Amino acid sequence: MNIYRISCLTAIVIASLIFYSCGKDDGRFREVDDRLVYLFESFEEEAEQRGVTLNLDTIEGNISQIIDPGILGLCQYAQNEGELNTITIDNRTWAESDSQFREFVVFHELGHCVLNRLHLDQQDMSGFCTSIMASGTANCVRNYNELTREEYLNELFQ
Ligand SMILES: [Zn+2]
């Protein structure tokens, strides 16, 4: 009886492992750094909530060193067939940022690479950037936080 139980359990464990590895092979975001996956999912969800259906399966996401000083992230558009649009987040920026700022940088780059958005450096009466797509080199002041997030995301996906 005990042996039977153990083998049953073993079978379940093995089955789970096979399912897990199969699931992972067929899974989404294969070309995305594990640390970025939740932000890719969140980007899709926030879009969906605003009536925009997106699929980020064809976007590559990396965290690695960007040599140019002051560049927090990049979006590179695919140049040839078979290539993917690729976002790269500077590894130092990633390490030094809180979750809010990480989201800001990733969503900005996905704004380029998924939504094909260009920079928008408008500012409101207080001098704050009106868009998450602000270039960071203009005069407006970034103001992405818990209170303003909703409004910035509305603007991003409008
Ligand atoms: Zn940009």
Image (cartoon, rainbow, N blue to C red):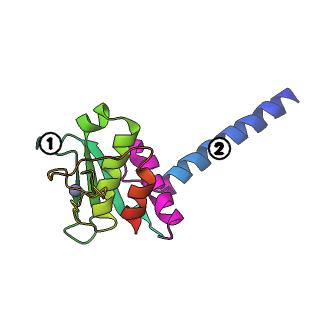
Residue nearest the observer in this picture, 52 or 81: 52
Q: Which residue is mark 1?
A: 70
Q: Earlier in the sequence, mark 1 or mark 2?
A: 2
Left or right of 16? Residue 87 is left
| Residue 45: % across, % down | 51, 59
Q: Does residue 15 belong to the magenta stretch?
A: no
| Residue 94: % across, % down | 30, 37
Q: Residue furthest right?
A: 1
Q: Three-letter amino acid code at disc 1? A: Gly
SS assignment at label 2: helix
Q: In the drawing, what numbered circle is on residue 16?
A: 2
Left or right of 18? Residue 56 is left
Q: In the drawing, what numbered circle is on residue 57?
A: none
The magenta stretch is 25-51
> Does any portion of residue 33 appear in the rendered image?
no
Q: Residue, x 45% and y 54% (percent of image)?
A: 150
Q: Three-letter amino acid code at disc 2? A: Ser
